[in-house]
Image (cartoon, rainbow, N blue to C red):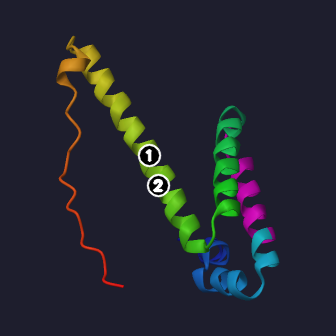
């Protein structure tokens, strides 16, 4: 990798710098974050931008509604896993439809568990 390309990437993704900005200068952090997101959108085909901007809007709203950065991270991570699960279900349906199977009978049953009652603390 060329040194100029490496230096450019280091300035874009230097974790320590971004962490310092987030802690000490949250307004500057937000401006830079938005700039980098906009640069990313400019680098992708126009026909994919609308969908990704909608997803970014959902992420931004989740960040705004979260009580802490950690809560925001967990909520966004859950959004990602929900999306992966939906993709997995669509793939499962496609494979079974292609093979001519009946989806209702072949779909795996969700895991179940027994919830154990926990004693309350004596007051």
Which residue is drawn at the image coordinates 61% and 73% (left, top)? 68
Which residue is drawn at the image coordinates 29% and 29% (left, top)? 92
Give the left or right position of residue 111, taking residue 69 as reference: left
> Which of the pair 10/29 is nearer the observer?
29
Q: Which numbered marker is on residue 120?
A: none
Which residue is drawn at the image coordinates 67% and 87% (left, top)? 20
Check if residue 79 falls in the magenta segment: no
> Which of the pair 41/64 is nearer the observer?
64
What span is in magenta?
A: 31-45
Which residue is drawn at the image coordinates 54% and 73% (left, top)? 70
Give the left or right position of residue 71, taking residue 43 as reference: left
Give the left or right position of residue 24, taking residue 4 as reference: right
- The quarter of the picture where residue 120 lies is bottom left
In 3D space, how far apart are the residues under numbered discs 2 and 1 (Cα atoms)?
6 Å
Q: Which numbered marker is on residue 78?
A: 2
| Percent position of residue 49, x then y | 70, 39
| Percent position of residue 64, x then y | 71, 62
For residue 6, above or below residue 77: below
| Percent position of residue 73, x then y | 54, 66
Give the left or right position of residue 86, taking residue 69 as reference: left
The answer to whether marks 2 and 1 mark residues whose Cβ atoms lie closer than 8 Å is: yes
The residue labelled by disc 1 is: 82
Q: Residues within 10 Å of mark 1 (few under 14, many from 20)?
A: few
- The quarter of the picture where residue 44 lies is top right
For residue 98, above or below residue 119: above
Label 1, secondary structure: give it.
helix
């Amino acid at each position: 990798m060329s040194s100029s390309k490496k230096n450019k990437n280091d300035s874009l993704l230097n974790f320590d710098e971004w962490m310092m900005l987030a802690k000490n200068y949250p307004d500057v952090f937000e401006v830079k974050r938005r700039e980098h997101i906009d640069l990313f959108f400019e680098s992708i085909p126009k026909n994919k931008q609308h969908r990704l901007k909608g997803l970014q809007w959902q992420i931004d709203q989740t960040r705004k509604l979260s009580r802490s950065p950690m809560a925001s991270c967990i909520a966004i991570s859950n959004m990602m896993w929900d999306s992966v699960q939906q993709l997995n279900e669509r793939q499962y349906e496609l494979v079974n439809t292609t093979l001519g199977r009946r989806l209702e009978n072949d779909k795996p049953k969700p895991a179940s568990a027994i919830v154990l009652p926990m004693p309350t603390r004596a007051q």
